[in-house]
Structures are given as C-alpha cells and as structure tokens.
Image: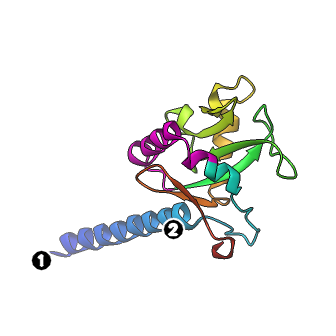
Amino acid sequence: MEAGERSSRVRLVVALALFLGLGVAALLVALGGSGGDGEEVAAADPACVERWNDDPAALQIGRHQYGSHGYTSLEVVRLSEDGTAEAEGGEGVCTLVFPAQALDPEPPAAALAYLQGSWVPLSALPTVSEIRLAELQSDAFTATNATMDAEGRITAEDASDS
C-alpha cells in the first residue's frame, strides 16, 4: 500500500468517525433532551395527555407524526389561546410540540393545540408565525416531557427521569 493511499484511508476513517460521533450526539439530544442545562422540565399535564389518548382522531394524527415524521418525544405544554406565549398556572390550551432543529417541512406537524373540541395544527392560528413554530420546536428539545408510540398514544415521562 502506498503512502498516499494509506493517508487517504486514514482521512476517510477519521471523517467517518467524526460523522458517526455527530450522529450519536444528535440522537442523544433528540432522545434525552430534557433538562440538559440543569433546568427543571415541567411535567406533562395529565389532562392533556388523557384528552389526546381518548381521541381516535388524535391517535390517527399521532400515528402520522410517529411514522411519517419520526417523532417519538414531545413537549406537552399549555399555551395562551393565541399560541404566542406559555400560559401561567395550569391555564391555557393543551398543546403538543414536537422537537426539531428546524421547522418541520410540513408546518402543521410542528405543534397541535386542543381548540374548540378538537386537535388542530398550531400553524392554523393567524397569530402563530413559522418563526414562532420553529422556536417552539427548537425549545422542545430541552423540554420534552412525554413520548409517543407507534399507535400515536402519548405517555408522560416521570419527572424524576428528567
């Protein structure tokens, strides 16, 4: 084996190792991204979880989120009715935010809110911009408090796991 060929193989192995390392790091952030900076993550509201799991239409959406978008974790949060701010004291609209580094290519999949008796894309609200959706998805990386299974059901994470 010539020195140039050996050098190329070494560079290839190093590049592959770096690429795999980045992939593992991204996976760790996506799967265990709650509370990474020491902040306490708010528990998923059990009423919101139950409302989702008891709704056949929501479960169908959840199967799409899981199968087509690859979402396995999420943040269950209560937002103001216009979707622009987090609600205080357990008030507000049940909202599910799916973590992503950038806005989902299908913006309606970024977050869903329970409004007027059904789960609707947060993107349907005129007060919620794509910039706001991207912020919510990015922030959800460190605030995930629930998981989703292949059937679209969500399970609140134990607060002690965060």
What percent of the width, then of the height, locates residue 136?
68, 45
Q: Amino acid at mark 2?
A: Leu
**Magenta segment main secondary structure:** helix
Q: What quarter of the picture does the C terminus occupy? A: bottom right
Q: Amino acid at mark 1?
A: Met
- Secondary structure, mark 2, is helix
What residue is disc 1 on?
A: 1
Residue 117 position within the rendered picture, expressed as x and y whole percent measured from the top left: 66, 32
* Mark sitting earlier along the chain (1/2): 1
Q: Which mark is residue 28?
A: 2
Q: Quadrant of residue 155?
A: bottom right
Asked whether residue 133 appears in the rendered view, the answer is: yes
Is residue 100 in sight in this rendering? no
Does the residue at mark 1 contact the one at mark 2 (Cβ under 8 Å)? no
> In the image, which residues are magenta?
51-72
Q: Position of residue 40 (x, y in %)?
A: 76, 68
Residue at coordinates 66% horizontally, 52% vertically from top-left?
A: 76
Q: From the viewer's perspective, is 128 left or right of 161?
A: right
SS type, badge 1: loop
